[in-house]
Image: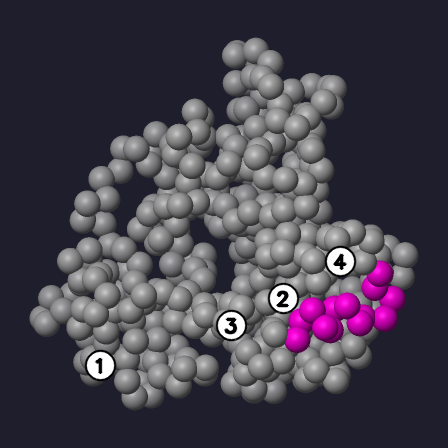
Amino acid sequence: MTEPRYTPLRERHEALGASFTDFGGWMMPVRYTSDLAEHQAVRTGAGLFDISHMAEFVVSGGPAAPFLDYALAGRLSTMKVGKAKYSLLLDERGGIIDDLIVYRLGDDRFLIIANAGNHDVVAAALRERAGQYAEHLAETGPVAVPLSTAPGPQIASVTDITDKFSLIAVQGPRAEEIVTTITGLEVTGVALDELGYYAWSSAEFLGSPVLIARTGYTGEDGFELLVANELAAQLWDAALAAGEPFNLTPAGLAARDTLRLEAGMPLYGHELSLETAPAQVGLGRVVVADKELFVGKDGLSARDLTDAPVLVGLVAEGRRAGRADYDVYAGEEKVGVITSGALSPTLGHPIAMALVSPSASAVGTALELDVRGTRIPATVTALPFYRRNS
């Protein structure tokens, strides 16, 4: 049995009284004080998250951009340096291996952040596909590499940097004020007040490079800071100190889960899996189907999704919430299953995402949730449940 791993911030979490849980092979803080308090802090002020369990890979080399067009569902070659894009790693059948974010660091250099529990399968898939794409180039001849003048072999390099870096997130409406006042952090690229959503800027913390991305998983504004492991604890302390006037609150995985659920954001192993096609879970737009070549293209084309279940939002009254794997009914007919559910701390009533039959997916459709043997009335609603004020 593999021993669970801890991030470089373990001592900081223990000092704050965190409760830990195993997540993707990592022992991560699930809460520090109260799930509700941590959730509300992110919605009203800001929350500080350790997300160092996430997997990080650098893809580089002359054909890096067209290789990612081949390896992933989206078109990454047209993304500008300094930007980020949400994408999907599909298998040959068009099922979802993982969802991830790609950052363009340079003409021929990209950072990929993937889910912790999928580290090994993502690493294997990227490396295997790098070889496949090199063979494709050998058969078809050199290709025009977008934005690239780099010489060298036509093979992309995939480097796993997961064990070298930590990832700290500051999320909430006061996030920008906090990050810009962290002692020792100097932004060397685009100023944070000019940085758009799904973009990144360069910085230094105590002389060491830091990547600051305006991305997140809470439905709020926020930043994710990629820093060398050796400086993670010092950056955490500096962020807490800068955030004290803004009610910056350490937040665990429990709050992170209810925040992302309110924002209608899918979670791998719940809404996303090898059995689901992107179009079933509202991610058809992520797939650039007119690309000449990408892994999963033929599999997606061969799928008949006419009667395949689709992802919907569900709202109910009262305090009893449907949870993952609870059944959904239309009358006496089972029409689906809940993928994620909770009593929404922000909205004050139960919410859930569920995969249901297309016939039961229209907004306004009345359904019932089987909550431990009791039928709870629910109504299909548009996602997300919560949208922040711009």
* Camera-side residue of 130 and 83: 83
Callout 3: helix, strand or loop?
loop
Whole-percent x and y of residue 62?
Answer: 68, 25
Badge 1 marks a residue whose secondary structure is strand
Q: Which mark is residue 389?
A: 3
Q: Earlier in the sequence, mark 4 or mark 2?
A: 4
Q: Image quadrant for the N terminus?
A: bottom right
The answer to which image quadrant residue 324 occupies is: bottom left
- Quarter location, residue 335: bottom left
CA gap between label 1 and label 4 equals 49 Å
**Magenta-tinted stretch:** 174-186
| Coloration of the structure image | one colour
The residue that disc 2 covers is: 222
Q: Amino acid at mark 2?
A: Gly
Q: Seen in the image, is 370 located left or right of residue 84?
A: left
Please name the amino acid that badge 3 sits on.
Answer: Asn
Residue displayed at 44% across by 29% down: 291
- What is the spatial separation of the Cα atoms under label 3 and label 4, in whole angstroms? 22 Å
Residue 199 visible, this angle: yes
Mark closest to the chain's N terminus, 2 or 3: 2
What separation in Å lies between label 1 and label 2 (alpha carbons)? 35 Å
As drawn, 332 above or below 229: below
First in sequence: mark 1 or mark 4?
Answer: 4
Question: Pointer 1: what residue?
Answer: 376
